[in-house]
Image: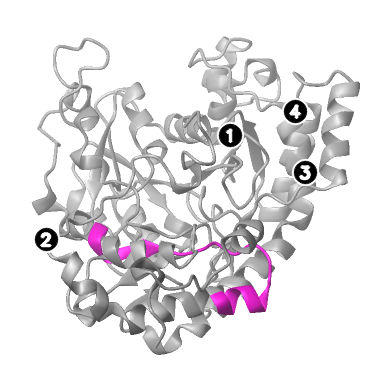
Amino acid sequence: MSQLAFLGGEKSINPEKLSANLKWPIVTREDEQAILDVLHTNAMSGTGITEKLEEDFCRWLGVKYALGHNNGTNALLAAMWAAGLGRGDEMICPSFTYWASVIQVMNLGATPVFADIDAETLCISPADIERRITPRTKAVMVVHYLAHPADMDAIMAVAKKHNLKVIEDVSHAQGGIYKGKRLGTIGDVAAMSLMSGKSLACGEAGMLVTNDKGIYDRAIAWGHYERFDDRVTTEYLLDYKGLPLGGFKNRMHQMSAAMCRVQLKYYDERCAVIRKSVDTFWDCLRDYRHILRPVRVDDSIGNMAGWYIPCAHYNPEAVEGLSVGTFLKAIRAEGDNASFPGGNAPLHTQNLLRTCDIYGDGKPRRIAFSDWDVRQGDASLPVTGTIQGRIMCVPWFKRFDKALIEETAAGFIKVMDNYKDLLEMDKGAEVTKGSLHFFAHSKEKDKTG
């Protein structure tokens, strides 16, 4: 039995080859030429190319309306406002997600109310959504976390019963499938990030999609002044044409739009390669699922889109309590430079959502317009509060290289077979927490955060 690299043995994974496989997005001369065309035609600040991208999105997803944004955060904020959220309203959402799924709703005077997640899918729990509904609840934010489709049938049933709008955050799962439908087409409105760390990556951009003309018109009126003209037909908006109601300028940069048109042409094909690669990795570890079990939707229900950071349930009880942090130190010592513990740090524990008076309201913004104190502790979100020490993320293979994938899996197997050698040094190890910022924004990749 070979000695763990963490304890002085030889590495089992080639980190250079692994890094090369993980490089993303795939940028070709076609992408470069599309961007150069924008530069040479001085079209950086227009909307013509963006509108062509929106047409592409409508055909691809099978929706009536798409609206490009300068980033996913503003696309989500526009979706929140367009869905009718305002002062004193509540939006039910997961705490276990990136901050941009949630916190900008406070700019509307509304407040997030956190529901727990499903322990298997890591997506918001439909049963816990219903438990959180009050007379002030206006909408539900559904995050298809790490590309796993949420339980949309159950969520839509709850929303219909209580007359709530459903917003889908598809930033992790662009193009994913749930029961034959594209994610983002099931709720009332959806928005997604298209920044460079996502599976559909085109620099810095976002997209809002909907089949509701009223929601589409409101999103235009909120932050697209140059398109707030006769194309907007919602009657009560007509008196305000020409100026953005939110005072925002959300226009997508046309170099990003041009690149995204090219990326979208090949996206489904590239996602199929990613799924084949990641599935091959998990197949190599099939005999170790008592220790590492993939967070993966059943093929009969949907797919994992471009996977977006493959994640696993880690079972410390199967390895005599070995912490996920120590386990991953050993994995990384073998040459895996891509795996890491935990997920996003839960939002409900953050001071911004507990004590921060952002706008001088005289009380924390989170409760500035609430009739009751919506702030929550871990006891009210038992899965969210304990999940950090029981999940980990593994390499997000972008290209099908069977030998490299098998080599990487062999490194994991080596650590799992030798876990007893790690137990002594693991005594007293703390649970490794996730980051508020997201995985693709590692300091190694982006010094600006």
Q: Secondary structure at mark 3?
A: helix
Q: Is residue 313 above or below residue 193?
A: below
Residue 385, position as x, y percentages in the image: 18, 54
Disc 4 is placed on an element classified as helix
Which residue was labeled with disc 3?
A: 261
C-alpha gap between disc 4 and disc 3: 10 Å
Mark 4 surroundings within 10 Å by alpha-carbon count, few (fewer than 14), some (14 through 19), many (20 or more)? many
Q: Nearer the viewer, mark 3 or mark 1?
A: 3
Three-letter amino acid code at the position of disc 1:
Tyr
Q: Foreground: 300 or 231? A: 300
Q: Amino acid at mark 3?
A: Arg
Q: Which residue is mark 2?
A: 428
Q: Mark 1 and mark 4 in contact? Answer it, CB < 8 Å.
A: no
Q: Position of residue 321 (x, y in %)?
A: 17, 73
State the CA–CA distance, disc 1 to disc 2: 53 Å
Q: Earlier in the sequence, mark 1 or mark 2?
A: 1
Pointer 1 residue: 216
Q: Which callout, 1 or 4, points at the residue further toward the start of the chain?
A: 1
Q: Is residue 118 visible?
A: no
Where does the magenta region start and end?
388-407
* Residue displayed at 58% across by 63% down: 305
The residue shown at (53%, 79%) is 299
Mark 1 to mark 4 CA distance (whole Å): 20 Å
Instruction: Report whether 26 appears left or right of 189.
Output: right
Disc with the residue nearer the chain's start (4 vs 2): 4
Q: Amino acid at mark 4?
A: Gln
Q: Which residue is mark 4?
A: 254
**Distance of label 3 from label 1 (alpha carbons):** 21 Å
Residue with the most extreme front position: 8
In the structure shown, which secondary structural element does the residue marked by tag 1 occupy? helix
Label 1 vs label 2, nearer the camera: 2
The mark lying in front, picked from 3 and 2, is 2
